[in-house]
Image (cartoon, rainbow, N blue to C red):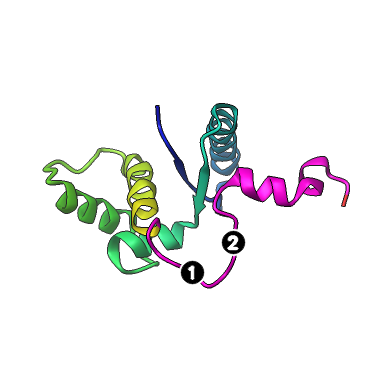
Amino acid sequence: KPDELAIEAPFFGKNIQSMLKLGRAQGVAMAAGLYRGIPIFEYSPRKIKQAITGNGNAAKEQVATMLMAMFGLHDIPKHLDATDGLAAAVCHYYNQNIDTEEEKPKSWKEYLSKNPKKVSGKE
């Protein structure tokens, strides 16, 4: 059983259909995590790229190459989107021991408990 769930935050791209499909998949993953009581951590694509390559504007090829080097992999995945999940997990691992001055919620569960009106839609 996983202890935590790291997910890439949605971003606005040019392809609307891809965005809708990605949003649905992210929603299902988050719902499954909430159902199981697993804390969910969300990272922007820029933060993930920064954590892996040191450059928040890195290309998918750069992220894949760095992950291959980190884990001793020899074959670049046919679809570079396959590395996104691993990159989010590594980013989360790196961010677990970083102390921040801001009091941000540590999970979606904590965020929702502090912002109940966001769930009910009655703000």
Element carrying mark 2: loop
What's the residue type where badge 1 is placed? Thr
| Region of the chain picked out in magenta, as a range | 96-122
Quick check: marks 1 and 2 in contact, CB under 8 Å? yes
Is 93 in the magenta? no
Decide if residue 70 is on the left or right side of residue 90: left
| Quarter residue 119 falls in | top right
Q: In the rendered image of this protein, does residue 109 appear above or below residue 115? A: above
Decide if residue 119 is on the left or right side of residue 49: right
Q: Residue at x 34, y 52 (%)?
A: 93
Please tell me which residue lies in front, 57 or 88.
88
Between the C-alphas of marks 1 and 2, the distance is 8 Å
Q: Residue at x 60, y 45 (%)?
A: 108
Q: Of all residues shown, which one is farthest toward the bottom?
A: 101
Residue at which label 2 appears: 104
Is 120 in the magenta? yes
Rendering coords of residue 50 (x, y %): 36, 65
